[in-house]
Image (spheres, grey):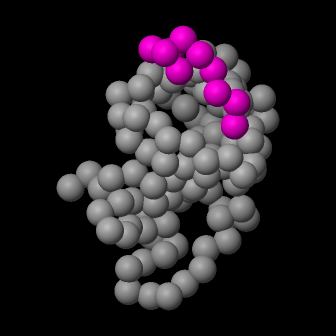
Amino acid sequence: MTELLPESANRVAHARTAIVSLDPVPADEVVSGAPRQGIKELGSIAGAEAGIWELRGGTVVDTEADELFVVLSGEASIELLDEGHTVDVKAGDVMRLVAGTRTRWVVPDHIRKVYLTPSAE
């Protein structure tokens, strides 16, 4: 996958309009709907990976990685299953997710976010 913002260049990425290829969410993660998701790598900086993630049309479950994200467009209700409460996010919101948190993402239309997460190295 080609990074939009490689370490060796001063560049800009138009994250709200970048093409993110969407694929069906694996069946074991789907709660309802026919959700599709995709990731576009931005690059890495100071031991963190950055990317754009988009989810469309449905409800899915996930176990999170340690992550900080900014919502660019759309909205979601994120049920924090182990904590027993829900956080609603929309464009402009910033959220931290702790590794291992089990979540249920309810996305009526779409959500697009830019995320930072520790490199897998």
Tell whether position 90 is magenta: no
1 relative to 62, above or below: below
Where, by quadrant of the figure, is residue 95 drawn?
top right
- Main SS of the magenta segment? strand
At x 45% / y 14%, what residue is drawn? Answer: 82
In what quadrant of the picture does the C terminus appear? bottom left
Identify the residue at the far left of this view: 121
On the image, the x and y values in percent for residue 86 come to: 63, 20
On the image, the x and y values in percent for residue 115 come to: 51, 53
At x 50% / y 41%, what residue is drawn? Answer: 96
On the image, the x and y values in percent for residue 24 come to: 58, 35
Q: Which segment is the magenta one?
A: 80-89
Residue sitting nearer the eye, 54 or 70: 70
On the image, the x and y values in percent for residue 9 come to: 44, 88
At x 64% / y 40%, what residue is drawn? Answer: 55
Residue sitting nearer the eye, 21 or 50: 50
Identify the residue at the far top of this view: 84
In what quadrant of the picture does the N terminus appear? bottom left
15 relative to 7, above or below: above
